[in-house]
Amino acid sequence: MNRAVAAIILEVTFFALAFGWRSWIQWRRTGSTGFIRPRRGASTAELVGSGGFVLALVLLVAAPIADLANLDRIGILDATWTAAAGVSGVALTLVAQLGMGDSWRIGVDPAGRTDLVTGGVFGSVRNPIFTAMLVATAGLALLVPNLVSAAAFVVLFAALEVQVRLVEEPYLRATHGPVYDSYLATVGRFVPHLGLEPVPR
């Protein structure tokens, strides 16, 4: 199968499952889809995080289209094994999303309060959904390794860093207090043991 076509099929599957199907499950459970748009007066960090996330997805969709239009591939990254990374990332994203239960959402509602999930994969990594999405994006990008797909990965990584460090972690610290501080000190941000934060004195 043409790798650009394979990338498009995987992307459609990824979006349908990670956003459509998971959102439907959340709506059935809670009456909310789990999507929280930036509110009026949202901070610059929140706007950059959410805007960068959307831009990364647009670039990811554009990458195989650019490949079909014969945009040059980046030779050193042009390998055939990368579909496995894309499929693995999609599966890991779904596992992590389901692990959040009713606390799953996209975005932050400062007035809302959900349970802090620290079990399952969240016992090893604080943001396993984002980690899995980066793996999926890397795999999809490497199927058609051009400048557009490379930009998709870089923009997503930057957007997630902003969202996690400047939006979600301050919100969770304010919401859950010392319990979250202990979690920050013992569980890595995106990979195990990396990105630990000392407990405030």
Image: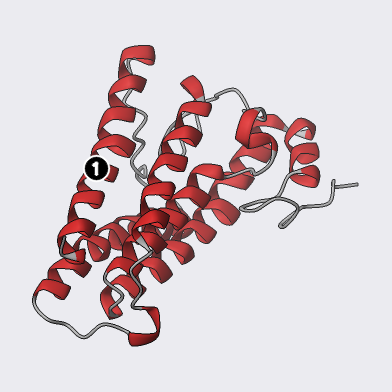
What x and y, as percent, mark residue 165? 60, 55
The answer to which of 167 and 90 lies nearer the viewer is: 90
> x, y percentage for residue 78?
33, 78
Quarter of the image for the N terminus: give it.
bottom left
Amino acid type at image mark 1: Thr
* Residue 136 on image: x %, y %: 40, 54
Q: Residues within 10 Å of mark 1 (few under 14, many from 20)?
A: some
Residue 175 is left or right of residue 167, and the answer is right
Inspect this view and state whether residue 107 appears.
Answer: no
Residue located at (36% from left, 49% from top): 87
| Residue placed most toward the observer, 24 or 138 | 138
Q: Is residue 61 above or below residue 88?
A: below
| Residue 60 in picture, x, y percent from top left | 27, 62
Q: Residue at x 49, y 22 (%)?
A: 101
Q: Residue at x 41, y 35 (%)?
A: 94
Q: Identify residue for label 1.
A: 13
